[in-house]
Amino acid sequence: MTDADTATLSGFDPTRPRHAVVVRGGWDGHQPVEATDLFIPFLERHGFTVDVFDSPAPYADAERMADTDLIVQCMTMSTIEKEQFTGLRAAIEAGTGFAGWHGGIADSYRNTSDYLHLVGGQFACHPGKHPDELVGEQSDNYVPYRIEMLPAAAEHPITAGVGDFDLVTEQYWVLSDDYVDVLATTTQAVREWDPWHRPVTSPAIWTRQWGQGRIFVCTPGHRVEILEVPQVDTLVKRGLLWASR
């Protein structure tokens, strides 16, 4: 899909100058630098000036946040100070978009429950392979699974035209509330070695309206090679534009 198609489907006006802040860091296994570098040129082609930070410190800068149309966060785990979180939430409530993928948004700042409330879904686990297959690498958690689009996805600018698709990577089991607008789900099966007794369906792609701001979350995106899957690439690009002020 071309950039023009992505912008059109998202109802996005690429002629209006915008400002994006990219916050990246945390656990290196999610390749926060390489992953965000995939999308910075895309944003620049759509009229954004982009500033990049390696901590959530800019969230505490009210003047900067007031001038920010979109925050792209790829910060797995780590911590956030009270004034930083307060600034982030205030910016979103005032209309700044907040978007990200995988653990960079759905597994950030575990010690701050108000952040989990803001995002609406929290990574709980990613059940992996059979215990006999484990080798102590990230690949222990790579399993085949399907992303399934809900009926609402057919007409939504982020997901229109994207059908169900399969991945082999981490499958996120997400704890969420019913204020998330779910566009796609994934279902964790029950395998002979699992302690749960029925399949568990989690949101895989969702949006959330918070004050005047839009939030977009895509749980696929463990590493660059997953973000480069055509469906994931399209969903993230559209989600960034959709979330922007």
Image (cartoon, rainbow, N blue to C red):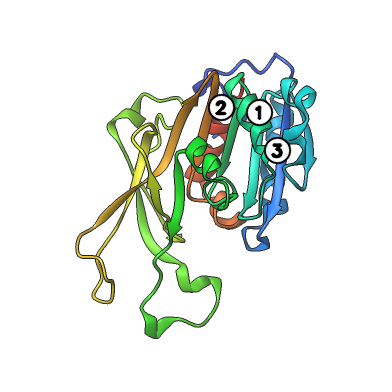
Task: Write down the residue under mark 1.
Answer: 70
Tell me the CA gap for discs 1 and 2. 7 Å
Q: Name the residue located 28 percent from the left edge and 76 percent from the top edge.
A: 193
Can you name the residue that lies furthest to the bottom here? 132
Please tell me which of labels 3 and 2 falls first in the chain: 3
Please tell me which of labels 1 and 2 falls first in the chain: 1
Please tell me which of labels 3 and 1 falls first in the chain: 1
Q: Percent from the top left, x then y, of residue 90?
A: 63, 25
Residue 68 drawn above or below residue 131: above
Q: Amino acid at mark 3?
A: Gln
Q: Secondary structure at mark 1?
A: strand
Q: Name the residue located 60 percent from the left edge and 19 percent from the top edge.
A: 95
Judged by depth in the image, the label closer to the viewer, 3 or 2, is 3
Task: Write down the residue under mark 2.
Answer: 243
Residue 176: image quadrant is: top left
Task: Write down the residue under mark 3.
Answer: 84
Tell me the CA gap for discs 3 and 1. 16 Å
Residue 110 visible within the image: yes
User: Does the CB distance between marks 1 and 2 fall below 8 Å?
Assistant: yes
Residue 99: image quadrant is: top right
Q: Percent from the top left, x then y, of residue 218?
A: 49, 43
Q: Percent from the top left, x then y, of residue 12?
A: 58, 18
- Between 18 and 144, the one nearer to me in the picture: 18
- Between 35 and 9, the one nearer to me in the picture: 35
